[in-house]
Amino acid sequence: MPSPLFFDDLELALTRGGVAPVYVRRTLLELREHYEDLESDARAAGMSNHEAECAACAMLGNQTTIASVILAHPELRAWTHRWPRTASWLRIALVVATFPEAPAMFCVDHGHELARWTMAVGIAALLMTSLHAYLNSLIVLS
């Protein structure tokens, strides 16, 4: 079997080239199955295990050739690579749309601090209201 780096490097090349992750996974799965078929056919032809592995690797080809053939098909690219401006605008719109959620997320994370603050503001408002009422009653009585 080709070294594990063969498939890892091919996956990296395809991902960097902008191929959609679903096509990358499918391609690697098909290449592994194709390699196993080539190897079993070589063994059936009477080759030893090592010879069958070498023959299957030679018939499969190198990763640069495979990657260049796949990257030549723009329909396999992720939509973010096919329409980068649209992806950029959508990313910005998503950030702007979720920005108002930030205070709510803060409230969820700091509930005990907000409860103390609310209690302090409530006590202050009660104190100020009672002081205002007391001063108003003094003005009315005088």
Image: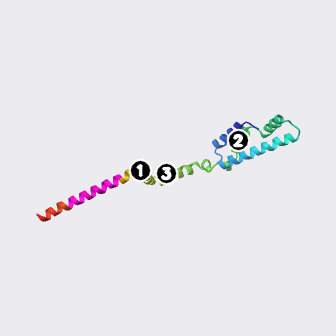
Q: Which residue is mark 2?
A: 67
> Is tag 3's residue or tag 1's residue first in the polypeptide sequence?
3
Seen in the picture, residue 112 relative to 13 is either above or below; the reply is below
Task: Please check the rendered image and state whether residue 115 is part of the magenta-colored stretch, yes or no.
Answer: no
- Location of residue 127 in the rendering, given as x and y in whole percent from the top left corner: 24, 57
Q: Is residue 115 left or right of residue 135?
A: right
Please give the label number shown on residue 95.
3
Q: Which element is circle 3 on? A: helix
Q: Main secondary structure of the magenta part?
A: helix
Q: Which residues are magenta?
A: 116-132
Q: Say whether marks 3 and 1 touch (CB < 8 Å).
A: no
Seen in the picture, residue 50 relative to 70 is either above or below; the reply is above
Residue 20 in sight from this viewpoint: no
Kind of residue at badge 2: Ala
Kind of residue at badge 3: Val
Viewer-closest of 62 and 85? 62
Please give the label number shown on residue 110.
1
Kind of residue at badge 1: His
